[in-house]
Amino acid sequence: MNRLAGKVAIVTGAASGFGECIARRFAEEGATVVVADVNERGAERVREAIGGEAIATTADVSRRGDVEGLVYAAKGAFGRVDIMVNNAGFTHRKGDLLAVDEPSFDLIGAVNMKGIYHSTLAVVPIMDRNGGGVILNMASVDGLRPRPGLTWYNASKGWVIAATKSMAVELAPRRIRVNCLCPASGETPMLPLFMGGDSPGARAEAAQEIPLGRLTRPLDVANAALWLASDEAAFVTGVALEVDGGSSI
């Protein structure tokens, strides 16, 4: 229960879904967690559930000032940042690619792509001074095996995978490992958008598309993130780890 003992981890999009489970799992393994989300009330709820030294910050990752603020809060409270989990994400509703309006397209890029850019600028100098660190980006199986109806979201996650590998190569001399996770459709608040609606039948159909026969659970992703963030994965960088029940095969 101490694989992340002494580490300070920032998790964005941590008020629900995969991010909440990652934050809780990291805390269980000894990390001091900064719970970051645009949803202030949700972030505070998760912080209270974690307890200990955890802090909550309100941040819109599409805004550079917000990201700089949350990193400043982490460093001010704990003196370091060892792990940066870029989990915050946004998608358009499943449907015709021509029907996605420009504001939605822009927000996908701002959250899924620019958010990683903002956090990298903020945390890399800190990690470099501390002798290294870990960056985890949330990609998707849709970035590896695109499905119809989510074109612009798929494209943003393909960007995350390419950025992760490029970052890993460039930051390796600074002893900063960079990896990403590629989950399949999961039991999160965004699931209805991915399916284009929500019903027991739609969920059952989505699960049937996954060889292991069920949707991705937040704990599946959290356990994978824990391993990649821990010293057990000390020689692993540039990986797009599929947490998808075989759906990318």
Image (cartoon, rainbow, N blue to C red):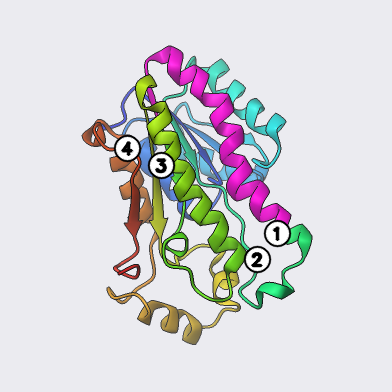
Question: In the rendering, at what x and y percent does residue 94 appear?
Answer: 61, 74
Residue 135, by quadrant, is: top left
Classify mark 4: residues with Cα within 10 Å, few (<14), some (14-19) or many (20+): many
User: Do the residues bearing badges 1 and 2 touch, measured as CB atoms within 8 Å?
Assistant: yes
What residue is disc 3 on? 165
User: Do the residues bearing badges 4 and 1 touch, measured as CB atoms within 8 Å?
Assistant: no
What residue is disc 1 on? 105
Classify mark 1: residues with Cα within 10 Å, few (<14), some (14-19) or many (20+): some
Q: Kindly report the distance in space between the C-alpha atoms of the residues bearing marks 4 and 1.
A: 30 Å
Q: Amino acid at mark 4?
A: Thr
Q: Amino acid at mark 2?
A: His
Q: Is residue 230 visible?
A: yes
- Magenta extent: 105-134
Q: Earlier in the sequence, mark 4 or mark 3?
A: 3
User: Do the residues bearing badges 2 and 3 touch, measured as CB atoms within 8 Å?
Assistant: no
Disc 1 element: helix
Disc 2 element: loop
User: Which residue is pictured at 61% across the width and 61% down the height?
Assistant: 91
Q: Amino acid at mark 1?
A: Phe
Q: On the rendered structure, is 231 left or right of 201?
A: left
Q: Kindly report the distance in space between the C-alpha atoms of the residues bearing marks 1 and 3.
A: 24 Å
Q: Earlier in the sequence, mark 4 or mark 2?
A: 2
Q: Earlier in the sequence, mark 1 or mark 2?
A: 2
Q: Earlier in the sequence, mark 2 or mark 3?
A: 2
Q: Kindly report the distance in space between the C-alpha atoms of the residues bearing marks 4 and 3.
A: 8 Å
What residue is disc 4 on? 237
